[in-house]
Image (cartoon, rainbow, N blue to C red):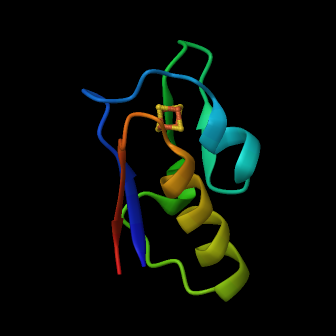
């Protein structure tokens, strides 16, 4: 699984960061993004995958792009 955020859609609600702080972060400049270590990287851990899916489902802007 790979994950990214469509920043043209993100409304910076912080929900994904609250659900899965391992993968998502709010930067000092007020942008929410996938952490550097997970950008373009295959996420293999099942527990982390589940949390990413939960975050994607909870995103009010449908801005989280999950590639299975
Ligand atoms: S849950 Fe969606 S809208 Fe909210 S900060 Fe994360 S990507 Fe942006």
In this orientation, which residue lies closer to the viewer: 44 or 58? 58
50 versus 32 height, above or below: below
In this orientation, which residue lies closer to the viewer: 30 or 59? 59
The answer to whether residue 23 is visible is yes
Residue at 58% from the left image edge and 54% from the top image edge? 55
Name the residue at the left extreme.
Answer: 8
Residue at 39% from the left image edge and 29% from the top image edge? 10
**Left or right: where does residue 66 sit relative to residue 45?**
left
Quarter of the rendering occupied by the N terminus: bottom left
The answer to whether residue 21 is visible is no
23 versus 11 height, above or below: below
- Residue 30 in which image quadrant: top right
Residue 32 screen position, x and y as percent? 52, 30
Residue 15 screen position, x and y as percent? 64, 36
**Left or right: where does residue 17 sit relative to residue 1?**
right
9 versus 20 height, above or below: above
Residue at 61% from the left image edge and 43% from the top image edge? 16
Residue 17 screen position, x and y as percent? 67, 40
Count of labels in the image? 0
Residue 42 screen position, x and y as percent? 44, 78
Quarter of the rendering occupied by the C terminus: bottom left
Name the residue at the top extreme.
Answer: 29
């Amino acid at each position: 699984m790979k994950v990214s955020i469509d920043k043209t859609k993100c409304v910076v609600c912080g929900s994904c960061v609250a659900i899965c702080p391992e993968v998502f972060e709010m930067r000092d400049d007020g942008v929410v993004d996938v952490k550097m270590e997970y950008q373009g990287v295959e996420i293999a851990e099942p527990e982390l995958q589940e949390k990413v899916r939960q975050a994607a489902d909870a995103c009010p802007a449908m801005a989280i792009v999950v590639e299975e």
